[in-house]
Image: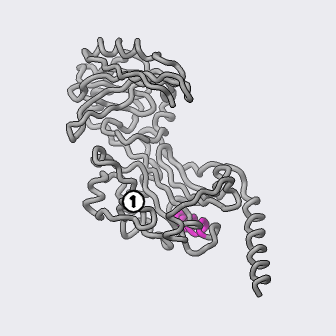
Amino acid sequence: MIWHLWRRKAAAVAKQAALLETFPNQLGYTALPGGPEQPNAIQTVLDQIEFPFRASCQTLIDTYGLERDKAFGRESVLITPCPFGLTGLIGSFSPNILGANFRHETPLWFGAMVSIGDDMLANLEHARAQLSAHFGPTQISKTSSNTLGCGWQAGPSSLTLTVWPAQWQTFPVRNDAHSRDPRLKTACSVGLSAGFRRALDAAEITWLVSAVPIAKVLGNPARTLDALWGSSPNGAERTFVREPVKACTTLLGRIALSGDEAALIICSRQLYIVPRSRITGLVLQNILPAKGGGGSWLSISYLGPNAQEQQLPVSELYGQEQSLDALAQDLGTALALDVRIEPERYDC
């Protein structure tokens, strides 16, 4: 009897392994409509189902409560009922809750786990079928060397489905959460990056269209308007990040002052509109080569809601020690700001 059970299990494993090899390689996520000054298809659906992606972390805590996730052992906010109406959820959609200094910001992402049984592919297909009703069809493929999945993308916004087949894990890692809730081992991970950026208000539009460039952004700024729009905001600090518009075209890769000199505009990987009254200085950090190649970071400092210093990036260069020194001094002079040079540290 035991022998027959073992053979049946081995045959099922072999069958699934063969099935996994039939999926195509890295097709990418299904592209949905959107663009500068155009509706974002993913955000449109989120608005239709009243998904609270525009709410701050603190608002979500106040609305849904904060509790301890038993499996993952971390603070969690469960958005219930699930706005997508997904079945098979382990819990519900939960945002990443930022630290206390940034709870006035919206979450960078939301996540959920879907499981209807021990079959990983069935869990993935179950999640895909339900979400395709909202976003249209998408094809499952190998999304990396050790993951299988699918998803949708509209510029800075994405919704992804991912599973980790055991046969593809070269270096299996013990996950204590799987011990606490075994369903997680074969569950489908659903990840939502809403890509939310605040829209420009009337004053900010006036600042933007009147802006005069004073320096170049050094590093790797967006080179086209579509690239700027499609770059997902990925830092905790997004107080001054704004949704790009067509008027940004002449400012790509530039640091500029508004016509009345009341605002600093930085058009790098994101569009930043910063009232000069909020800026307290410039911060230069040089990194010496070690295990890494070193580099240089230049940031603006300002006081956040809790009166603690916070920073947003102006330029970042890697492998070029002290390459932002001249830019820091030029901006300090142009903006009448002190430049604080942090102690050098090694790129370890």
Residue 116 in picture, x, y percent from top left: 56, 74
Residue 102 in picture, x, y percent from top left: 30, 45
Task: Please tell me whether residue 55 is drawn above or below residue 321 in the rendered image.
Answer: below
Mark 1 crowdedness (10 Å alpha carbons): few <14, some 14-19, many ≥20: few
Q: In terms of secondary structure, where does tag 1 sit?
A: strand
Q: Nearer the viewer, residue 74 or 261?
A: 74
In the image: residue 75, left or right of residue 116 = left
Residue 127 in picture, x, y percent from top left: 55, 66
Q: Nearer the viewer, residue 288 or 306?
A: 288
* Residue occupying image coordinates x 45% and y 62%: 72
Residue 211 in picture, x, y percent from top left: 32, 21
Q: Give, as a three-letter code, the residue at label 1.
A: Arg
Query: Does the segment drawn in magenta span residue 173?
Result: no
Q: Nearer the viewer, residue 20 or 2?
A: 2
Is residue 252 something one can see in this rendering?
Answer: no
* Residue occupying image coordinates x 51% and y 60%: 190
In the image: residue 168, left or right of residue 297 = right
In this figure, which residue is indicated by the disc labeled 1?
Answer: 74
Q: What segment carries the magenta color?
A: 123-133
Predominant secondary structure, magenta span = helix
